[in-house]
Image (tube, rainbow, N blue to C red):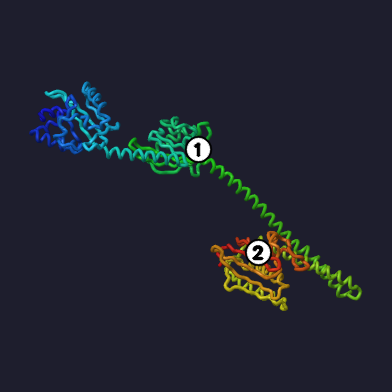
């Protein structure tokens, strides 16, 4: 019976040559197929199964024969399946089930698993039969689930991307877009899908773009477009948007696709325009500054000549009067002339300091390794030589080196150490220390003294030109020295600040950022 039963089935399969032999060979052949094979009569009773069916559902051969086929389904589906089976019996046809449906089988243990079923009706002498091929698709369903999860994650990544993403086929029709692309061009997703990508370009560019797209399809490769070019997209409202586009070809089951990442360059173009405007303004300012510097140099030369000459004359003639007419002048007259000479000399020194301050701003840095310790010792020796009666101790650290301009650093140290020497005049003994310390990897130089000090409330003003915190009659000076020091330090890219206590001394600290200070 088995041989006759499958005769028509194999005839359908065009495998007549396989029918040579007996039932044993035929059964062995069916046992070797990878899917379960179940033969069911018109009443839904299982008449025969192959070896794979036994392994798939876990029943013994004698158990499964004669069972209703619904036994192989979860209990909740059995009643409905009887109706489906009756309907199939009334209109039998070859059909597949379970590839797209959630169709489940039930093992003898009660475990459920996804299956795909192919049905083939067969008419034999004994009546209508149905041959069911049953495949366990657990692995396929797991793969499909992973693919769905991957697609979901990919969709999330695309929608979270900062740029618009447009996917188009080889024919230029849009197959996918992300949210940013919708926002960028002002269209809903439904308005874009299936449309030619040229709809997102200004009309004058569309015809040419078809040719570019065709060339790209012929030789696809990753490439960027728009860098250095004026490339524009077209918003739904007709506004043209400056964009940068990156293209990536991909092969999919649906054929060759192109992924275009589209970046809105509106902000960057605006910034570039603003930067260009700033650069132009800076160039104009530099040109004006060049003119101002030339005028300042001319003015400095004029000041140097036109003021120095009359000051020298005032000082010289005052001195001549004191020498040649001393017997004619009374004590008051001589005092007046001495004051005139003193004022002229102070004015001369102020002019020198102003010219020095001006020249520092214009001077180019001549960077070299400078021994600050040696400079400081030379300055200290000169101060003690000029006032040998002073009781002042100089404490100067060894091997303080810096990459700096030697002449400018000499000016700065002369002012700082000279100030410390001046303001320790009333301290016996006076103490002046020059050293260095490390603050977060940066060398900080300091000059501290035990002199007069000052109120820290006025510390911000101390580096302003002509600002003085002490009476000139008590501590002579013109208020330009510390402004000069600050300008030297700033020219080296460093900074300078101070700490002080009235009656206990002051400390000036500075850094030098030109190359490396050590």
Asked whether, in this view, residue 449 is left or right of residue 239, the answer is: right
Q: Estimate the spatial distance between the alpha carbons at disc 2 and disc 1, rounded to whole Å.
A: 59 Å
- Work out whether 290 lies above or below 439: above
Q: Specify the quadrant of the image occupied by residue 457.
A: bottom right
Specify the quadrant that holds the C terminus: bottom right
Residue at 62% of width from left, 71% of height from top? 434
Q: Which mark is residue 210?
A: none
Which residue is label 1 attached to? 232
Residue 441 pos. (x, y %):
54, 63
Q: Specify the quadrant of the image occupied by residue 177.
A: top left
Residue 252 pos. (x, y %):
34, 38
- Work out whether 393 lies above or below 194: below
Asked whether, in this view, residue 91 is left or right of residue 170, the answer is: left
Could you tell which of marks 2 and 1 lies nearer the N-terminus? Answer: 1
Closer to the camera: disc 2 or disc 1?
2
Asked whether, in this view, residue 484 is left or right of residue 336, the answer is: left
Which residue is label 2 attached to? 499
Disc 2 crowd rating (10 Å Cα; few below 14, some 14-19, many 20+) is: some
Quick check: can you spot residue 33?
A: no
Residue at 70% of width from left, 77% of height from top? 391
Residue 469 pos. (x, y %):
73, 63
Q: Identify the element where label 2 is drawn.
A: strand
């Amino acid at each position: 019976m088995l041989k006759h039963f499958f005769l028509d089935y194999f005839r359908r399969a065009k495998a007549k040559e396989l029918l040579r032999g007996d039932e044993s060979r035929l059964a062995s052949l069916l046992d070797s197929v990878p899917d379960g094979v179940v033969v069911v009569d018109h009443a839904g009773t299982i008449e025969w199964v192959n070896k794979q069916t036994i392994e798939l559902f876990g029943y013994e051969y004698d158990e499964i024969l004669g069972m209703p086929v619904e036994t192989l389904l979860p209990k909740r589906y059995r009643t409905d399946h009887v109706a489906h089976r009756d309907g199939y019996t009334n209109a039998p046809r070859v059909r597949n089930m379970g590839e797209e449906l959630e169709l489940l089988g039930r093992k003898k243990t009660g475990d459920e698993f996804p299956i795909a079923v192919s049905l083939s009706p067969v008419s034999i002498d004994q009546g209508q039969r149905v041959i069911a091929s049953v495949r366990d698709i657990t692995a396929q369903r797991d793969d499909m689930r992973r693919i769905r999860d991957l697609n979901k994650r990919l969709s999330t990544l695309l929608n979270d991307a900062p740029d618009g993403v447009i996917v188009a086929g080889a024919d230029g029709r849009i197959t996918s877009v992300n949210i940013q692309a919708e926002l960028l061009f002002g269209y809903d997703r439904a308005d874009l899908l299936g449309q030619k990508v040229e709809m997102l370009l200004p009309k004058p560019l569309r015809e040419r773009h078809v040719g570019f797209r065709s060339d790209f399809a012929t030789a696809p490769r990753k490439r960027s477009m728009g860098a250095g070019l004026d490339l524009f997209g077209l918003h739904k409202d007709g506004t043209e948007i400056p964009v940068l586009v990156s293209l990536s070809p991909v092969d999919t089951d649906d054929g060759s696709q192109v992924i275009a990442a589209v970046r809105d360059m509106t902000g960057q173009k605006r910034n570039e325009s603003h930067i260009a405007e700033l650069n132009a303004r800076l160039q104009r300012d530099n040109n004006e500054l060049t003119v101002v510097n030339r005028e300042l140099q001319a003015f400095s030369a004029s000041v140097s000549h036109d003021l120095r000459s009359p000051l020298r004359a005032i000082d010289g003639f005052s001195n001549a009067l004191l020498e040649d007419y001393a017997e004619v002048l009374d004590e008051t007259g001589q005092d007046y002339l001495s004051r005139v000479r003193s004022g002229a000399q102070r004015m001369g020194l102020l002019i020198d300091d102003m010219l020095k301050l001006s020249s520092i701003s214009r001077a180019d840095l001549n960077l070299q390794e400078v021994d600050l310790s040696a400079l400081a010792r030379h300055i200290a020796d000169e101060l003690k030589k000029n006032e040998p009666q002073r009781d002042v101790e100089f404490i100067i650290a060894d091997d303080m080196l810096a990459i700096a301009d030697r002449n400018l650093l000499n000016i700065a140290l002369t002012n700082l150490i000279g100030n410390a020497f001046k303001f320790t005049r009333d301290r016996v003994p006076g103490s002046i220390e020059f050293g260095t310390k490390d603050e977060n990897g940066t060398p900080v130089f300091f000059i501290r003294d035990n002199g007069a000090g000052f109120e820290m409330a006025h510390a911000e003003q101390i580096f302003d030109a002509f600002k003085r915190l002490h009476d000139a009659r008590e501590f002579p000076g013109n208020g330009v020295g510390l402004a000069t020091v600050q300008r030297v330090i700033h020219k080296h890219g460093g900074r300078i600040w101070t700490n002080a206590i009235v009656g206990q001394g002051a400390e000036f600290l500075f850094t030098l950022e030109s190359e490396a200070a050590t």
